[in-house]
Image: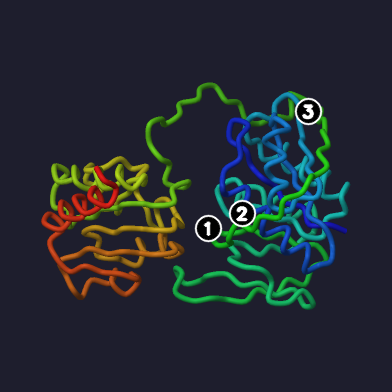
Amino acid sequence: MSVLVFTENWDGKFKKLSFELVSYATKLAEMLNTSAVVLSIGPVADEELRKLGNYGAAKILNATGDGLNSLDNQSWVNIIFQVAEKVDATVLVLSNNNTGKALAPRLSVRMKAGIGAGVNGLPKSTVPFVVSKKVYSGNAFADLLIRSEKKILTLSQNSFELVEKPGTPEIENYPVSLDPGTLKTRVKEVHKQTGKILLTDAEIVVSGGRGMKSPDNWGPLIELADLLGAATACSRPVSDEGWRPHEEHTGQTGKIIAPNLYIAIGISGATQHLAGVSSSKCIVAINSDKDAPVFEAARYGIVGDAAKILPQLVEAVKEIKGK
């Protein structure tokens, strides 16, 4: 019996998301009196794989073979299912991101396992198996009871602290032979965004809404983000107007993020927007309307004109940083 955790890699490198998953799986394995086994798909150097051992992984399986460099749902599900059978996994842990959401339902059918989607913590009990998640756009919590023998959990990003537990994991190469005819996904071109921090990876996000009044007023917001090492984001009306790129749109219909710090500038706080950022550890709001809904979700708030406050905030950060 074991807890199997699937960790993505990006060009052979792991991100904080991967270490968070391993930390969670290790703690869950302790609750179940078993061990955590990690599966990585695609070419990854042993040195990079060993980093997972810093968070409690006892064993790491690295599935390698032709055709595994890009996500192919059917192929990856077959690999994960085979490994789950090999290590006798009773619980499978994945991230609640696009990849996890694509794989979990297929795996649920193959493993005859119940799914706890978007969980945000360790089980409240293991017998019966009860785990919680946010519901109603993050405004409430629900307890999920999973009765099946095998279980699949997708963990919400940034919902579990990294817990270091250094060790020397056993690394095993798991060669996979795929029939090229079964691969449904063909990657013809790759265009990567460079020079910017990706929203889904950012620890800090500085976001603007219609309260910025014009696309010409974005300079101080971008400068603040640069000073803080943050990603920039926006509300849907801003992206719809073409003030900012659509890939910066956060909210229920855009990117759902969970940074440590989310600074909302000129954003009223519509339910759809807050649904996409409510998992942020700390929300700071700047708005001229003292009754704006965003202040209900914010830990700290400033009532005032963003055009006047932003330059002062930029200067204050510069002073602290000695710039």
Extreme-front residue of the structure: 322
- In the rendered view, how is the structure colored? rainbow
Q: Which residue is mark 2?
A: 20
The answer to whether marks 2 and 1 mark residues whose Cβ atoms lie closer than 8 Å is: yes
Mark 2, Cα crowd under 10 Å, few <14 / some 14-19 / many 20+, is many
Furthest residue in direction top, as rendered = 188
Q: Seen in the image, is 140 located left or right of residue 33?
A: left
Task: Give residue 68's position: percent from left, percent from top.
Answer: 69, 30
Residue 37, compared with residue 123, is above or below; it is: above
Report the mark closest to the observer, 2 or 3.
Answer: 2
Q: Amino acid at mark 2?
A: Glu
Residue 89 rendering spot, x and y as whole percentages:
83, 55
Horizontal arrangement in the rendering, residue 33 relative to residue 256 (left or right): right
Quadrant the N terminus occupies: bottom right
Secondary structure beneath label 1: loop
Judge left or right: residue 62 versus residue 287: right
Image x and y of residue 204, in percent:
39, 52
Residue at (17% x, 69% y) in the render? 303
Quarter holding the C terminus is top left
Residue topped by disc 1: 158
Q: CA distance from mark 1 to mark 3?
A: 34 Å
- Position of residue 301 relative to residue 260, above or below, is below
Q: Amino acid at mark 1?
A: Asn
Q: Is residue 123 above or below residue 118?
A: below
Residues at circles 2 and 3 in contact by the CB criterion of under 8 Å? no
What secondary structure is marked by label 2? helix
On residue 178, which mark appears?
Answer: 3
**Residue at horizontal 65 percent and vertical 29 percent from the top:** 69
Write the residue at 69% across / 62% down.
Answer: 115
> Residue 58 got which mark?
none
Give the camera-side residue of 156 and 47. 47
Residue at the image point whose x is 26% and y is 47% from the top: 224
